[in-house]
Image (spheres, coloured by chain):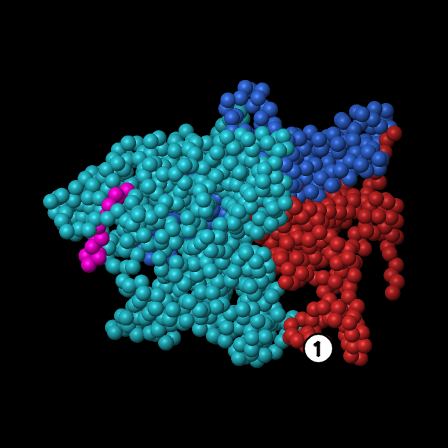
Amino acid sequence: MKFSLNPITAKKLRRFRQIRRGFVSFTILAVLIGLSLIAEVLVNSRALIVRFEGKWYFPTYGAIIPGRTFGLDYDYATNFRELQARLEKEPERGWVLMPPVPYDPIENCYPGEFFRPRAPSFAERHFLGTDQLNRDVLARVVYGFRNALIFAGCYIVLTYLIGVSLGCSMGYFGGRLDLFGQRLIEIWSQVPFFFVVIIVASIVSGLGGMNLGWLLGVVVLFSWTSITWYMRSVTYKEKARDYVHAAEVIGAGNTRIIFSHVLPNVISTLVTFAPFSVAAAISALTALDFLGYGLPPPTPSWGELLRQGTSNLSAPWIVASAFGALMLVLVLVTFIGEAVREAFDPKKFTIYR
Amino acid sequence: MRDYFLRRLLLIPPTFIGVTLLVFAITRFVPGGPLERAIMEARTSETRRGGDMGRSSTSEEQLADLKAYYGLDKPIPVAYVQWLGKVVRCDLGTSHRFNEPVRDLITQRLPVSLVYGGITLALTYGVCIPLGIAKAIRHRTGFDNATSALIFFGYAVPGYALGAILIVFLAARAEWFPMSGFVGENFSDLSIWGKVVDLAHHAVLPLVCYAITSFAFLTMLMKNQLMDNLAADFVRTAVAKGVSFKTAVLRHALRNSLIPLATHLGASLTVFVGGSYLIEFIFDINGMGLLGVQSIFDRDYPSVMGVLVVSSLVLLTGNVISDMLIALIDPRVRFK
Amino acid sequence: MKTTKIALLAALSTAFALAGCGKKETPPPAAGASTSGTAEASATAGDTAKSAYPGLEADLAATLKHESNFYVIKTAADIPTNLAWTSGPDLPEFADPNAKKGGTLNFYLQDFPRTMRTIGPDSSGGMRQYLLDYIVMGLVLEHPNYPGQAVPGLAKEWAPVREERTMYFRLDERARWSDGAPVTTDDVIFSFYFHRSGFHKLNWYTDFYSKTWEKVTVFDKYTFALTLAELRPDFDTRVAGMTFYPKHAMADLGPDFVEKYQWRVLPTTGAYTVREEDIDKGQSVTLTRVKDWWARDLKYYRGRYNPDRYRFRIIRDHDKALEAFMRGDIDIFQQMTAVPKYWYDTLPNNHPLVADGYVHKATFYNRIPRPDWGLYINTAKHLLDNKDVRWGIQYASNFDMVASQFYRGDAMQMNTRNDGYSWRVHPTMMARKFDPVKAREYFAKAGFTKQGPDGVLTNDQGERLSFTITTYRPDIRDIMTILKTEAIKAGLEFNIEVLDQSTGWKKFQQKQHEIGLLAFSRSPELFPRYWEDGHGSNAYEDAYIGPDGKFVEKFSDGTPNPKPTRVRPNTNNYTSTFIPEFDRLIEHYDRSASLDEMKALAVKMEEILYEEAAWVPGWAQPYFRCAYWRWVRWPEGMNPMLARYADEFFVHWIDEDMEKETRSAKNKGQTFPPGIHVFDQYKEP
């Protein structure tokens, strides 16, 4: 299906594509996101395809397949690497195709051996080594990335929704709404963050435990204020400008002024914010996980990896992976944000030479 | 205008009461308060002797006794009003955990946070404003790209994790810097110059971690704002009329661009009193951030409230000040 | 520094000025309430007794008069003449009498002590051991190689009279407080008075000193007798747990004790004290050896307490402390036990410091009641009240893997909850080993027969076999992860919940958890206890109904309630165990005066607990480990049997010449033979 773009948007996209640094970052990040969406196919302890005694199996998605299905002596999920090794000895019964990284983020890759970090090994397909619980670091990085992305996406939508609507109204209408909003923000932004985290953690323990939704709620609860504050002051500034007065004079309604005049003009600030917001979301999640107030173990997360890494400096691959992943993604995101700002800003920049 | 700011100042007390009342109420709802912590400590304390206390149960009477000791035996409104009454007389109560007046705890720690906060603030604004200007002027040059990469890398680094690594490699193993603390143990014996050096020696690593993440945001804000204004008609007109480029930037464009930075200043003030808990924790710096968060973990409510009083007053005045700055810089802004 | 202070004052004064002007706007009723409220506050803070408290001497005199049943004052002539005075058996010493005195030992604390009191709120921090538990002299000392055997302490001789449940003591006339004052029976009386007063706000002490003892009888300046309320097999060493306070230094004692004595270091009978100038708030605390300590040449005390000073700096994080240790800032690092990676990865045997012999590593096998790590299954919860489910959980919990792979084979799975006593509580009982097949059998018996798409079993009602394990110890989250990933093999899902300490503790105390992973630490006692964590009345308030229809506490006072509903909070019965037969045995056990009888009862009780399956045996480490610089020296065999920590009995010393030699050798690159020691003379067979 093909749909035609509005010419202005198309122009913006063209401009965006011309900004190389941003566009390259965008491409890389898009590929990474795409890969993370199909992570189960790439990094997984479940086989992609199993041919066993004349039948085909595709275990990647869906219910677990008990070991008995393949003639193993247990009822829990099949260990496909073991099955693969076994079928290699008796190829007439079938074969197993494993993903490129045949580990999932929570499994103990060396059952029967000591729990200790192991250095990266291409032969064992632990491309970034294993962590202190014998789990594959790459798998944890990949699935941690996906969690962070989901988190950041929801975070941005929620904070912007609240921030823009409340901030613009406050800045534009001023008066009591502004005063009330300011008090609310002032009061709210001073409630100690950890307090609320502790409270939420203790309340949700009765409601199914900490999960991404609760965590998002806590972080958004404390993040909407800053964007609202900015939107308020920028709207305030815009409102004092002549074009708003002009619009007022020709009889434009409030809604129209806000949406057609003020908002497009404050978009530059908003877009400057966007990459920082994504980065802030990822950083916040990482920090909470680092402190142990994030997602419950054994959920893969970068913060948890970072914590492990900093206390296992004799296994530098852990901290390097976490640091590397975090820096790569945050830098990509900010580069993209830069380029987007440049491309979408209706005021083309001027260079005086 | 004067009326506006007068009103803003008058609004501080109700906001202050709102904040403190809210947090005060929260302290009463958090499961596991000072009471539980005290009982737990007494009961789980590992004592070679007198093990009899270890596993006994708690009677109602004991609970009531401890409740009274921790001031939890009164309803919230009564307790809050009592607390507020003391605050007016500059009495922040006594910390359950340190068993010292909270005011003393804060006055011991505030200088530390002020020093770090002040240096960090000066450092970030001192670097970010010129850097932002330079980047705006040299947009899309090699300089712009290189510095962008640099500050974004810095931004992406989690300061607390960096701190943990720096301590191990630069302080513990290479022994270039002290491992922790605000000043050395023999600080009081040093000459003035020695004190400065000692302070600086201790401050290098924490400051790196404090500041590294804060450059990116302000620099980019500065740069983008300035570029917006450079593209605006009034600057073009000025340049067209023959104003030198330098004057155009510094006189005309820069002033407008500083507005969002000014709004940010109000929020930045919290760094004076809040510090960064994680970094203070990692470097064992006894600042306000560490006190605040530790008291939350310890359920030391008088300290929690004390830190809150100071930080909220600073922030509240900070907000008024930043509004004043906006008005000062941008005459078009009218506060009604 | 001065300028910052001025800036600070300026900032503060503005802040308070602002606050002040804010308060003027406060509505008048609030202001009025605040004044009256303050009056109330001071009344409460001072306790109701404050106004009535007549001062120490008067109150003490009144108490002695009022409670003359408890405090019995007699004369020397009243001392029974037929007493069999003893100074305990002649046992070998456990320290090295040739240990060198001197030097400063560097340690660390994770947090600055909140008080210098050894009693009262906040006094149980890490410093307390060095102010009280390891230091202060007891009336007698339980010989750490001979559990149950007392040797002299403050008392030079004593005479037990079992039939009267009474022990006569004669204080050592040489015994001195660190300020030179003699220790007399005045201090004994005073200590009972103080502990029972409640001035310290911790009523457990009040209870202990009120209920354990029936009376204290004083004969003369040095002779007194203590009468126990109940005769138990640990009669001889019971008194070792008593702490005395110096009356002469506490003349201003009163209901404001907690605040007044916050930072006051009281004279001690032990070898170390803290000088006021050595409390560097927030930075460090230093212990200094008492000059001419009275017990320094006594048997069982000579050769101990050797370094002149112990310096504790504050390092919040063990990782960092280990780095500081490796840098030479700390002399002994003791966290090696709990965290295997320190032993094996951060400071492995081939680490240059170890291989070159600068740092020694030691494993010491001790014999003490082990912390009872394990899963506490709350039997009051839905599904967990089903014994088959609990049996299934027993087989689905892979603690064997924790012991053999997480602790790298050094730890072992516990067999009973009371492992590590000087006698084996149940001679043959073994923990159920991880076995997913058997676990599934039991789950099937409980109706969990179908396996869901996520591998978790469900029953006919569609309930999933999924439980939350709660802990407040973030350091064991890895162990929980191991249990979780293994349990799924049995079709059981564990959700992990790591709570903040006070929140988690509250959850357990309210019995709101499903399964808890935790441990109670224990003092080295002669026999285990069952009442606190096993008796039905600690699980339900309505466990037993008396003849008049009211709820009673004991099996012997009533009849068991078949359907108890009122969960009792604030007890340690985290498994909500309520088995009438078990309670009957506990009550028998707790009154028993014969160790043999208790042993027989314990076997029966352990069997009931096994059948109940509400506690899954976790892991135990039968040793402690530490690393120390080679100039820290130990006696032959390192430590006595009951040592829980390397420094507990203060048998180490510092060889200052060796320190100089080692430090200069390290700079020059000279090496020494490596020292990796294993002391397994007390290892359990």
Q: In which image quadrant can residue A248 be found?
A: top right
Graded by Cα atoms within 10 Å as few (under 14), some (14 to 19) or many (20 or more), the crowding at tag 1 reads few
Stretch in magenta: C154-166
Residue C396 lies, in percent from the top left, at 56, 69
Residue B14 lies, in percent from the top left, at 50, 42
Compare residues B139 and A321 and report the one nearer the observer.
A321
Q: Chain in red?
A: A
Give the farthest residue toward the left: C77
Question: Which amino acid does the dot numbered 1 rest on?
Answer: Gly
Residue A203 lies, in percent from the top left, at 52, 58
Image quadrant for the N terminus of chain A? bottom right
Rendering colour (chain B): blue
Compared to C304, does C503 lie above or below?
Answer: below
Q: In which image quadrant can residue C55 be found?
A: top left
Q: Which residue is mark 1?
A: A71
- The stretch drawn in magenta includes residue C164: yes
Rendering colour (chain C): cyan
Compared to B163, does C230 lie above or below?
Answer: below
- The stretch drawn in magenta includes residue C158: yes
Residue C140 lies, in percent from the top left, at 30, 47
Give the residue at x 86% y 26%. B241
Give the residue at x 36% y 47%. C92
Give the residue at x 36% y 52%. C146
Image quadrant for the C terminus of chain A? top right
